[in-house]
């Protein structure tokens, strides 16, 4: 493909514009090709507007675009930082939850141990109280038995004295008779215990 020098297109365009044409001949290209009387003022206006835009407007547009781009970049950086902070906070909260769970497990284990110890202590106290109650009951029964035996011995002695007085017909010394009967009952008690 053949290449033209850079300015060749501009020169060709200017040549077409400046080429003498018949005034009355209207061709299809007449609409597309500007008239020199309109072209040069439009070109000068375009160059003036372009220079004004390039000198005054375009830097502020670029500055605004750069500021907007920086704001977007700052927002992206901030969101990344927030995301990282959230991940750190999540890890920290998970660690805190695990630590709290471990503490709760320890507290539950200690409470179970304390409950078992309290249970054992209560059972031990109940056994001691039952043993003391049994011992007191035995002692009380033994004392009652002894008192009953003494009372029965006395009654038997009184009955025996009355019976002996009636059989013999004479009155014996009551104290002597009671001593004899008590000796007899003591010997009888020794025989029962053996």
Image (cartoon, rainbow, N blue to C red):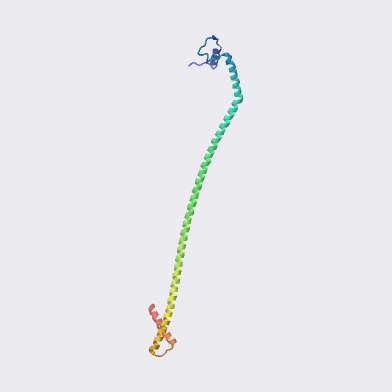
Res 127 → quadrant: bottom left
Along the line of sight, the residue nearer the viewer: 148 or 42: 42
The C terminus: image quadrant: bottom left
**Could you tell me residue 25's position as x and y percent?**
52, 10
User: Eyeballing the image, is 36 above or below 93?
Assistant: above
Residue at 60% of width from left, 21% of height from top?
A: 49
**Could you tell me residue 143's position as x and y percent?**
44, 75
Residue at 45% of width from left, 61% of height from top?
A: 120
Residue at 55% of width from left, 37% of height from top?
A: 78
User: Eyeballing the image, is 51 above or below 162?
Assistant: above
Along the line of sight, the residue nearer the viewer: 19 or 104: 19
Along the line of sight, the residue nearer the viewer: 20 or 128: 20
Q: From the viewer's perspective, is 128 left or right of 45? A: left
**Could you tell me residue 75's position as x and y percent?**
55, 35
User: Eyeballing the image, is 17 above or below 158?
Assistant: above
Q: From the viewer's perspective, is 162 left or right of 100? A: left
Res 7 → quadrant: top right
User: Eyeballing the image, is 164 above or below 122?
Assistant: below
Q: From the viewer's perspective, is 87 left or right of 156? A: right
């Amino acid at each position: 493909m053949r290449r033209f020098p850079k300015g060749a297109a501009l020169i060709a365009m200017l040549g077409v514009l400046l080429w003498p044409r018949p005034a009355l001949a209207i061709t299809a290209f007449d609409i597309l090709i500007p008239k020199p009387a309109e072209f040069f003022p439009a070109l000068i206006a375009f160059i003036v507007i372009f220079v004004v835009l390039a000198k005054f407007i375009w830097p502020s547009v670029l500055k605004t675009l750069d500021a907007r781009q920086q704001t977007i970049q700052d927002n992206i950086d901030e969101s990344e930082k927030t995301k990282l902070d959230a991940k750190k906070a999540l890890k920290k909260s998970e660690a805190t939850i695990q630590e709290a769970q471990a503490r709760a497990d320890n507290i539950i284990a200690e409470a179970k141990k304390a409950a078992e110890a309290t249970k054992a202590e209560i059972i031990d106290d109940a056994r001691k109280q039952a043993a003391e109650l049994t011992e007191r009951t035995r002692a009380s029964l033994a004392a009652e038995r002894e008192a009953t035996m003494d009372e029965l011995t006395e009654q038997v002695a009184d009955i025996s004295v009355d019976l002996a007085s009636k059989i013999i017909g004479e009155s014996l010394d009551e104290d002597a008779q009671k001593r004899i009967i008590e000796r007899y009952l003591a010997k009888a008690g020794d025989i029962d215990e053996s």
